[in-house]
Image (cartoon, helix red, strand yellow):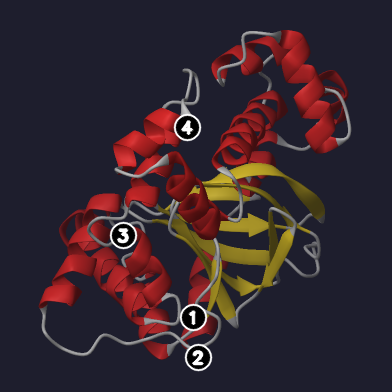
Amino acid sequence: MSKEQIKQLIAARTDNDGLTETGVKGVRLFRATQSIPCVPAVYEPCVVAIVSGAKEAVLDGQRYVYDNSQYLCCPMSMPVKAGTPTASPDNPLYGVFISLDQQVMTALAMDMENAGGVLPVGKGDLRAHGIRLARWEETFTEALLRLLSLGSNATDSAVLGDARLRELYYAILKGEAGIFARQAFGAGNAIARSIAYISAQLDAPISIDDMASRAGMSRAVFHRKFKQATTMAPIQFVKSMRLNNAAMKIAVGMTVNEAALDVGYVSPSQFSREFKRMYGQSPRQWSEAQNLPMAVTKGLQS
C-alpha cells in the first residue's frame, strides 16, 4: 500500500514530463510518458526509485532494468546511458531521484561502523561495479513515504526535510545495497575520492599518475582497484565522463565546439573522432538528432 501512496503523491504533484522539485534539497520527482531510448548521461551519486513503469541504465555495456521491485543505487559519479523505453501515456513512469550527499552519507557510514553492532550484509552478488540494484524493503519504502509526505509545505520541508532524508539514507545503508554504498562512502575510500576529483576537473588536464599519487597507490595498483570499482580503466572512465557530459550539453542546446571546450578538449577533430567512436555518429549528427523536449532530456540525464 505504501508504494501506491508514493505513486499517488508523485502523480498529484507532477503536471509535466521531467523533473519536479519537492522542496527538500536533492529530492526530485520524475514523470515520463514517452518511450525514449537510452542516451548518454552522467549519474552523480544517487538513488533512483521507480513506483510505476520501468527505467533503464547502461554502464560499460551492462544493462540495468528496474521497476518498483528494485531501486538503483549509484554511490559514485558514473558515465551511463539512461532511458525510459516502456513509458507511454497509458503506462506512465513515476519515480524519485534522491541525490546522495557525500558528507551526510560518510558520517552515517562511520556512525554505523562505530556503533558496535553487527552491520547488515546485503544478499546477492557483492561484486557490483558502479551501480547496484536493491530490493525495495519496508524500511526504505516507509522512509521514502515519510519524506515525500512533507509535500510542498515549505515550513515542513525546512524543519523536517533533512531529518527525514537522513532516515532514508540510513535505510539505504541498511538495505541490500548497503554494503556497496558503505564501501563507497566509508572513510578511506580513495577510489571514490578520485572519481569525485575527476568529476570536478573535467575541463582541465587529468593525469592518471597524479590521481594514483593522490590515492597513495602505485599506478598499477590504482589502475587495478579503479577498474574493480567501475569496470573501466581510469583513462576510459575519464573519456566516458567527458563525452557523456558533452553529449548532454549538446542535447540541451550548447554548440559542439563549446561543449568540447567545456569538457577539456582542445582539439575539435580529436573530440569528433572520439565522440563518433563512442556513439556511432558525429557530434553534429548527434546535435541534429536531438529533438526531445528539453525537460524530458534533462530528466533522463539525472
Asked if residue 145 is positioned above or below residue 24 in the image, the reply reads below
Q: Secondary structure at mark 1?
A: helix
**Can you tell which of label 4 and label 3 is closer to the viewer?**
4
Do we see residue 4 in this rendering? yes
Asked if residue 285 is positioned above or below residue 146 in the image, the reply reads above
For disc 1, the neighbor class at 10 Å (few under 14, some 14 to 19, many from 20) is some
Asked if residue 153 is positioned above or below residue 211 in the image, the reply reads below
Dot 4 or dot 2, earlier in sequence: 2
Residue at point 74%, 15% (across, down): 270
**Can you tell which of label 2 and label 3 is closer to the viewer?**
3
For disc 4, the neighbor class at 10 Å (few under 14, some 14 to 19, many from 20) is some
Q: CA distance from mark 1 to mark 2?
A: 6 Å
Dot 4 or dot 1, earlier in sequence: 1
Q: Mark number for residue 5? A: 1
Residue under label 2, please give it. 1
Residue under label 3, please give it. 185
| Figure quadrant of residue 287 | top right
